[in-house]
Amino acid sequence: MADHFTETTHSSFGQNIIRSLLGIPVGILLFIASFAVLWLTEGRTDWAKIAADTQVATPDRAAGFEGRAVSVTGVITSTELLGDPEFVAPGPFIALRRDVEQFAWVESQSGRTSNQTGGSSNTQTTYTYRTDWTANPRPASEFRVPANHDNVPLGVPSTRFVAPRAAVASWNLDIANVQLEPDTVLPPTAILRTGRALEAVPTGNHLFLGTGTPDAPHLGDVRVRFTALRNGTVVTTFGQARAGSIKPLNIDGTSWLRVFSGERPQAIQALAAENTAVGWIGRIVGFLMMWIGMLLFLGPVSTFLNVLPFLGSASRFVTMLVTLPLAILLTGVTVVVAMVAHSLVALVASVLVLIVGLLVLGRGRKPATA
């Protein structure tokens, strides 16, 4: 079911002018910040390359690699059982994640603005309320129309559990600092239920709790799903070898210790996919910031021309037509320049390190005797 509420607001010509003028400094800030976003995006650490450059350590002998950046592929194990105190009895898990959703009211909105002769405008905003599964149910006080849209506070939070100790083959793992994510969905039949789970109804990959049914839930009903990294899974970990353990590797001021299910090539491929996704997200965000900044900066022109609505509409169309390719061009140029600049910085840094190393070696040599 869904409820719809429409709200109409009227803005005078003066209000629209003031609003558009206030958008100018915001547009300038967005435009400038977009270059910083693009620069930082291209200068990010490529963890796939870091991983590919690590030395493959012997899994059955945790020695001989002290202080080096290494990768270890082997079976991850723990001598302790892990569970969820409220739902899952302790079992052979390295990591266990509980994801909770509640059947609750969800708000969405859409709007349409019509310009009037004289520069004023009317804005119609439609708020739609429907019930659906959500991981973050909002309280009614945050809705535009709170009446009859009360949500029950989420009594079962999503959380994550990690074994206190673990090892990959013969190497101890710094489990407290590792970026370790469960990757296998546990259906209810694969866990030994305990606590609140004994009252739940298994449905697919979820446990259902509430007064309704899985097919016809009531407001406030919850469903819980578990994912886990099992004891005995073959994984690949990247880090620094220290005293028989895999510790975080410090790169550019960032501590980095990752564990992936599967062999080393698949782990490096997963890191490369992450790097590509982060890069495109950063570029798209930078482009949108640049384009929106241009539109806000030029917004007062269309607002003034809205005295005659068709002129305002035409000017907005022309503004978008001009700024879109300009934003694409500037984004592309900035990305290329940032890529080249960061590559040059890395090259210069490598040359300086080489020169310093040669100088140190030269000073360390003793002069030959006559």
Image (spheres, helix red, strand yellow):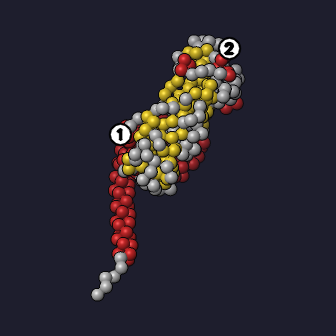
216 on left or right of 342: right
Residue 73 location, x and y as percent? 41, 40
302 on left or right of 14: left
> Which mark identifies residue 25?
none
Q: Which residue is mark 2?
A: 211
Residue type at tag 2: Thr
Q: Which residue is mark 1?
A: 265
Using the image as rendered, state which of residue 26 and residue 248 is in the foreground: 248
Q: Quadrant of residue 283?
A: top left
Q: Quadrant of residue 88?
A: top right
Residue type at tag 1: Pro
Residue at 60% across / 39% down in the picture?
164
How far is the residue under mark 1 from the one under mark 2?
Answer: 48 Å
Residue 94 location, x and y as percent? 54, 34
Task: Check whether the beta carbons of the residues at disc 1 and disc 2 lie within 8 A of each other.
Answer: no
The answer to whether residue 80 of the structure is visible from this angle is yes
Using the image as rendered, state which of residue 124 and residue 311 is in the foreground: 124
Using the image as rendered, state which of residue 196 and residue 112 is in the foreground: 196
